[in-house]
Image (cartoon, rainbow, N blue to C red):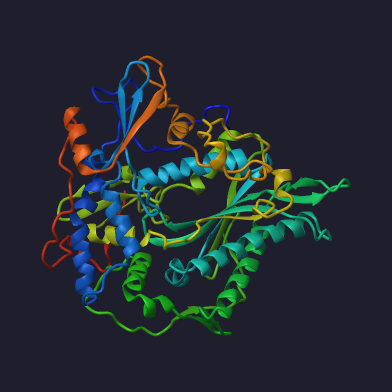
Amino acid sequence: MSTHPATPLAKAPDAIWPGGSPPGYERRRPEGETLHRLVREHLRTFYAAVEHGFEGARLPDFVRADLEGYVGCGVLCRGFAHLQCEGCQRPLLVAFSCGSRGFCPSCLGRRMCQGTLNLLTYVLPAVPLRQWVLSLPFELRAPLAYERDLMGAVARIFADSVMGWYRRRLAPGVPCARGGVVTVIQRASSDMKLNPHLHAIAVDGAYVPGPDGQPSFRALPRLKTNEVSDVLQVARVRILRYLARRGVVHLSPEALEIDDELAARDPVLAQLAAAAVSGLPPAGPELRCRPPVRLACTDGVGPTPMAALVVQELGFNLHAASIAGAEDQASRQRLVSYVLRPPLAKERLTLLPDNRVRLDLKRPFRDGTYALEMDVLSLLARLAASVPPPRAHLVRYSGVLAPASPWRPLVIPRTEPPPVDPPPVPPAHTQPPPKPPRTGPRCHYWPWAELMRLTLGLPVDTCLHCGGRMKLRALLRDRESIERFLRHQNLWTEPLGLAEARPPPYFRSVTRLKPTSQVELFE
């Protein structure tokens, strides 16, 4: 992967050439995008609607920082890096990104590209891969969305259930057999509703120790739908028992009761999560106290097959039909990119009259719905709910792929990292003591130019006019220097700030007259 240019994965952060773009390169202009416009024009109104509905309470700081940071993502007047060709002296300006982990298509596109290269180059072994997707019941989504420890434990239990099934299926009686799983926590569905669910990329088999003690891989010959049902039943029971021990749910023969501690700790965030899960208005005139949700828990029917290798039971849904061969690099790349994809593509949004926005679905729903129309503030509520809590790890490694696994160096790809320029050597009297050498390949941060070359085929670190090397000259952060430089290049435009909040009623679209905040469209 590191020696051959990859096919395009997604758009990475953009750059511009003053005086014209080279052939085949088109810079991104965030100021003219639909998503940027609706966030810029309606964000303060959304804040006012939340504070009005909760008597002055406001959204958490980490949600506000992510929403406001997106407004300055990719905008030159907010700061940029100045590169210059060592040969013809042509400049290249690269705007800073916001580093969002919530919904920014550009920043999450970069994370997807970097994560895909790291997993394929340094982590995933050359064996068949299978994707296991676990969706949780609606009643559990809001309580788990902002509890990073609980969601991390659910991801660990699910990965362990998948690896345990592989071990029982392929290596019965071999307790030291191991599988490997990379689990990614996605927070939103295609309609941007809050839907924390798990995408697990598992090695489609198990590693067993050979006569010489080295791990040997046993591939799964075929997966059946009833075997997917077995995995779902084990994972469902283990997850519910763990949540019961933590006091999140209370099991009983008739039903299970769900206690939402988030409602007492942060009522605004709890109401936002509940609204983003169900599609109801994100902020109302009052905060109501509701009894515990009761979810029917009658066993006896068992998992229901929904399609080939897709089963469902009591709100839990498990999908295991996506696979990639050991030598099929294109399929492996598509699989990993899909698991790490951003929740929203800006091309799917269309701004309509009367404060409405249309969201085209990635694929139609079962009832034929292919697009949704909703109030702009309803979409902002779903964007806000997609922001993960601070210090929440969204990618987790298990089994032989775990960092502390003794078999990890024996099964992961044996590749050397790409060469980078060595840092300057300090004087001898200031040098720190040497560190012990690292064993085995490690994931690393891919420089922006290298990432653009490998994912989009764009040699940004090479001048397209003379072939010279682009060298970093300066990082411009203060407004005075930015404005002076951009005016000299005839690229200065006044920064577009947030529009003032409009007075109530805040929701003014015709969709608010419907029973829910969305309108289904049919072909």
Query: How many marks can you see?
Result: 0
From the image, which quarter does the N terminus lie in?
A: top right
Residue 490 makes an appearance in the image: no
Residue 515 makes an appearance in the image: yes
Above or below for 380 versus 341: below
Picture residue at 22% right of the left edge, 71% below the top: 51
Left or right: where does residue 240 sit relative to residue 66? Answer: right
Picture residue at 75% right of the left edge, 57% below the top: 167
Left or right: where does residue 152 sit relative to residue 359? Answer: right
Q: Position of residue 170 (x, y in %)?
A: 77, 54
Question: Front-most of 496 and 338?
Answer: 496
Above or below for 268 versus 19: below
Extreme front residue here?
429
Picture residue at 36% right of the left edge, 45% below the top: 105
Above or below for 287 versus 95: below
Question: Front-most of 278 and 56?
Answer: 56
Q: Position of residue 123 (x, y in %)?
A: 62, 44
Left or right: where does residue 255 sit relative to residue 288? Answer: right
Question: Front-most of 87 and 53?
Answer: 87
Extreme left residue here?
503
Q: Position of residue 228 (x, y in %)?
A: 64, 58
Q: Position of residue 192 (x, y in %)?
A: 36, 56
Extreme top residue here?
466
